[in-house]
Amino acid sequence: MELFQTIIANISNFFWTYLLSILLIFTGLLYTIRLKFFQFRFFGHVLHNTIGQIFKKNKHEGTITPFQAFTSALASTAGATNIVGVPVAIALGGPGALFWMWAVALIGMATKYGEIVLGMKYREVNEKGIWVGGPQYYIKKALGWNKIATLFALFLMLELIPSAMVQSNSITTQVEAAFGWPVELTGIIMAVFITLIVFGGIKRIAKVTDKLVPFMVITYLLFGIILIVANADQLPHVFGLIFTNAFTPISAAGGFAGAGIAQAVRWGIARGLYSNEAGIGTGPIAHSAAQTDHPSKQAFWGIFSVFVDTIVICTVSGLAVLVTGAWKMVGPNEASSMITVAFSSLYGDAFGGTFIAIFLFFFVFTTIGILVFFGEKQAEYLYGLKTAKFMRIVYIIAVYVGAVGGLKFVWQFLDLMLAFVVLCNVIPMMFLSKEVKLITDDYVHRIYKGNGGKPRVTLFTSELDKEKNG
């Protein structure tokens, strides 16, 4: 078994260190260049049409509001990866890993924008009258690659089983350390709460996420920024480490074992992708249910989500462990507790541990809820609604099994399965970049510039299809 796990780990490392890193960077650069650096040129416009329009109601086609779609998608990314995943990346790749997180996020904004544009363009209404979409739909409809669409749905459906296990285990260990609760009890509580939420479908999930996610994100950022400001004298040295280690090896220091450039790139890109999921294809699944009148408008939330998730939340977590020196106090094997050590340095052991445990619980709770929805949609696409309901139960069982630390050998497949998911999505995306450009140009020329530079309400027609087909 140990040899088997080593083989799986080596294969996963190869994919993430070389093949996927190159593909993801290339795809991000392709979309960034083809869209003429859209995510940077129109960033102010993106902010105006996302957070600036939160309370604006619309009656466009869709199942949930644009903001609910955003918080639902953000729920799958803003979680354990932002809090404990960033310290793990620093422990294994050094401070330079944070630089590569930023790099993959900046170009990942274009990738995620493109995914959501395509998801909105090719979404459809299912038997229950709910809008559904995602990579499997645009791969099949736009390219006719039915087998690749099926593989994407299958790999993602299976990958979410170990993903749910790892997520639930990350919280049970924290709760046990903070409150002494047995992992079995936390596992049962998690499973019950998840059941109550996911059996209400995307509408109930959205109602939970649009209340919990903004509150959790703002509160976590507030306490994190206060911690960083309290150690502001360390910031020049820390930023020096980040930019230096991104391009040169760093030696061992304290509990840190040292890291080379390849490790910084590997862990920075992998954790950056885990954090914002640009290229994985999960974002369009949630956003496809949104009420909107143009694909680009909803895709703006994708740009904003990557910014919030990686540029803001992950940066706060990373700087917190770096300015406090926690990254040198805790070894790689206990890296997930690094953020607790950092917060405890200012707020005290009792409050620091409790704070992280509580926020991890709610972050993971919302993350698992939307992951179950993602898995259901893959099962629905592959086998229909009855199988989707069955998979819902499978995921809930996986939450409890993972919470108590069961079937850990299954966890070994997480990185590998995710690699296959990414491959099935990013390669088709390369072939669809021209279509995303056409849709974006339509928005810019017909909506953005068509009303004195301000967006106006308009329906997205099939004119682009006519242009695309000559």
Image (tube, rainbow, N blue to C red):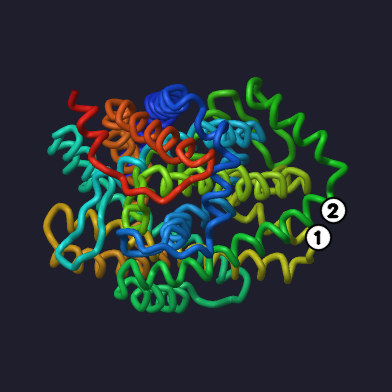
The mark tally for this picture is: 2
Give the amino acid type for the residue marked by disc 2 in the picture. Ala
Asked if the residue at tag 1 contacts the one at tag 2, i.e. Cβ–Cβ closer than 8 Å, the answer is yes
The image shows residue 289 at horizontal and vertical percentages of 32, 58
Q: Which residue is mark 1?
A: 346
Q: Which residue is mark 2?
A: 230
Query: Label 2: how many residues lie within 10 Å, few (<14), some (14-19) or many (20+)?
Result: few
Query: In this rendering, is residue 90 above or below 382?
Result: above
Q: Residues within 10 Å of mark 1 (few under 14, many from 20)?
A: some
C-alpha gap between disc 2 and disc 1: 8 Å
Horizontal relation, residue 83 to residue 126: left or right: right
Q: Secondary structure at mark 1?
A: helix
* Quarter the N terminus occupies: top left
Give, as a three-letter code, the residue at label 1: Leu
Q: Is residue 4 visible?
A: yes
Name the spot of residue 93 as percent of width and height, x first.
59, 34
Q: Nearer the viewer, residue 356 or 74?
A: 74
Residue drawn at x 84%, y 49% is 231
- Disc nearest the viewer among 2 and 1: 2
Q: Secondary structure at mark 2?
A: helix
Q: Residue at x 33, y 66 (%)?
A: 202
Query: Residue 43 appears at what percent x and percent y?
Result: 57, 39
What's the mark number on residue 326?
none
State the residue at coordinates (50%, 42%).
Answer: 303
Of callouts 2 and 1, the N-terminal one: 2
Identify which residue is drawn at 47% across, 37% down: 270
Q: Is residue 390 left or right of 274 when viewed as pictured?
A: left
